Image (cartoon, rainbow, N blue to C red):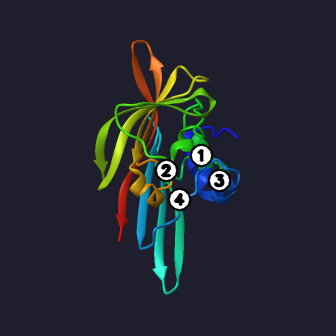
Amino acid sequence: MAMAKASVMLVVLISLGSGALAQGLLPELLYPGGYTFLRYEIRAPGKAAFQWILEVIPKDDSYEVKMAFTRKIPASERFSLFDVYTGVDIMGAEDLPLASLFSVWDKEIEPGKSYFLRKRARLVTEGEAEILGIPVITGIYLHPDHPDLRAVVYIPRLSHRALVLFPPYFRVEKKEGNGWSVVEEIELVEFAHE
């Protein structure tokens, strides 16, 4: 099953995460415990930002998990609730399958290497960085079915992947002339784990 747009994949993972795990699309990384707060922002040029919030709250011998999607839409704008839910109305027309990228979600990766993934996709890692206190490996994700698209991706170190559902930074770019233009960005803008 190929995931289409990054934003749609994020929504699908959130709402159907257990089904994806059961089908082997995503490696299962068990939650390590404690309190966690995540706020992702999904942006496309010329469109209003779309936010996804997840909060995990320990309660006695259980966890309360809260999820929310937030987006401000002017009252004068006509919109579909389905499109708002899936994020379809804020994204570009290009599709970049992401299932191959998640095939390494439970594997240790290192900077300065090229990883060949499912369906002949490739992850070329570059360096190390930190985003909101999360150590990440930076890289470029390429898919042979879409030679005019690439994604700049920050993959958390394996020690932190169970705390995030999606990379802390993911930017889809489209080839235009001698350069690349931004199609969409998904960025973790707030993170806490205690």
Query: Which quadrant does the N terminus fall into?
Result: top right
**Nearest to viewer (mark 4 / mark 1):** 4
Give the amino acid at mark 1. Answer: Met
Where is residue 34? Give x, y as percent: 42, 74
Asked if residue 194 is positioned above or below residue 68 in the image, the reply reads below
Q: Which residue is mark 1?
A: 9
Give the amino acid at mark 2. Answer: Phe
Query: N-terminal of the two: label 4 or label 2?
Result: 4
Residue farthest along the bottom direction in this orientation? 60
Asked if residue 182 is positioned above or below residue 188 in the image, the reply reads above
Q: Which residue is mark 3?
A: 81
- Horizontal side of residue 27 vs 190, given as left or right: right
Q: Which residue is mark 4?
A: 29
Give the amino acid at mark 3. Answer: Leu
Kindly report the distance in space between the C-alpha atoms of the residues bearing marks 2 and 3.
24 Å
Kindly report the distance in space between the C-alpha atoms of the residues bearing marks 1 and 3.
18 Å
Give the amino acid at mark 4. Answer: Leu
Query: N-terminal of the two: label 4 or label 1?
Result: 1
Q: Which of these two is toward me, 47 or 104?
A: 104
Q: Which of these two is toward me, 82 or 55?
A: 55
Say few, some or many: other residues with alpha carbon within 10 Å of mark 1 (under 14 / 14 to 19 / 20 or more). Answer: many
Of helix, strand and loop, which one carries label 3?
A: helix
Query: N-terminal of the two: label 1 or label 3?
Result: 1
